[in-house]
Image (spheres, rainbow, N blue to C red):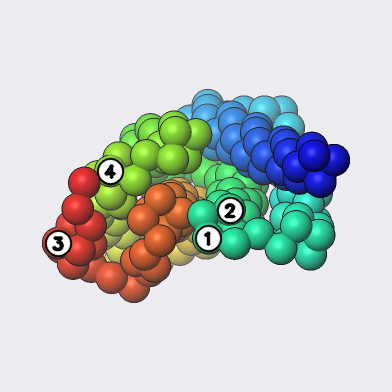
Amino acid sequence: MENMNLSKHISGQFNAELDDIRNRVLAMGGLVERQLEQSLDALGALDADLAQRVIDGDRMVNDMEVAIDEECTRIIAKRQPAASDLRLVLAISKTITDLERIGDACAKIAKAALDKRSKNQQPLLVSIENMGRHATRLLHDTLDALARMDAEKALQLHKEDVKIDKEYEGIIRQLMTYMMADPRSIPEVLDVLWAARAVERVGDRCQNICEYIIYYVKGKDVRHVSYEEMEKDLKF
């Protein structure tokens, strides 16, 4: 009887630890989502103060990644999880890496708002802001799918990155036109290019997180698999 109670106690502790890292990764996601929104606001208004707050806030994102990663490592070493529990810990460990990279992207977007030369490229900044709002919605929906571990929704969101890629390609064409028309604009156009690239990478990171959700729920590694193949293999 005592052994049964001990096993139940250990199981309860383990479940609490899993719930804790799930809550912490969602809190990290919420912070990163705010960082993205604020970086785009700063870029749209060329608000240096807000941009600097985003850049300073990236340290908190980094700290959260380190803390959660350490907890994931501790759980694996101490609990030796198997099956779906192991997949959950691995999915969270991979997710926080992508969230940290989105945090880095936010800092890059904010740095463009600090660059005084960016004022000369206001029409292009509007295009980036529009693409950024699309990326923000994708991140929000991806985090929602993560909270519910909704693999079907994750599959739907996975293809949304294609739309962001197309918007990015359109901005690149605009940038090339600007540079060819006036070679003197190249330095300031390149600053805008780095911001556009940072927004595009947010979509890529969301796509990765969707793959981790599918991995946890379905036990299938769908990295480097086309959307059509994923849709064919995954039965909901």
Mark 4 vs mark 1, CA separation in Å: 20 Å
The percent position of residue 195, horizontal first and vertical second, equals 50, 51
**Could you say which quadrant of the image residue 136 lies in?**
top left
Residue drawn 23% across the image and 68% down it: 226
Q: Which mark is residue 232?
A: 3
Q: Earlier in the sequence, mark 4 or mark 1?
A: 1
Residue identifier under label 4:
152
Residue in the picture at 40% in, 50% down? 217
Q: Amino acid at mark 1?
A: Ala
Q: Is residue 78 left or right of residue 123?
A: right
Relative side of 231 to 90, left or right: left
- What is the distance, in whole Å, between disc 3 and disc 1 at their CAs? 24 Å
Contact, mark 2 vs mark 3 (Cβ under 8 Å)? no
Q: CA distance from mark 4 to mark 2?
A: 20 Å
Q: CA distance from mark 1 to mark 2?
A: 6 Å
Residue that carries the numbered disc 2 in the rendered image: 85
Quarter containing the N terminus: top right
Q: Which residue is mark 1?
A: 83
Q: Earlier in the sequence, mark 3 or mark 4?
A: 4
User: Where on the picture, by quarter, is residue 12?
Assistant: top right
Between disc 4 and disc 2, the foreground one is: 2
- Closer to the chain start, of discs 3 and 1, is 1
Tell me the kind of residue under disc 3. Answer: Lys
Amino acid type indicated by mark 4: Glu
Q: Return the disc, 4 or 2, that comes first in the chain's sequence.
A: 2
Which class describes the residues within 10 Å of circle 2: few (<14), some (14-19), or many (20+)? Answer: some
Secondary-structure class at tag 3 = helix
Tell me the SS state at disc 4. Answer: helix
| Amino acid type of the residue that numbered disc 2 sits on in the rendered structure | Asp
Above or below 64: residue 204: below
Residue 220 can be seen, yes or no: yes
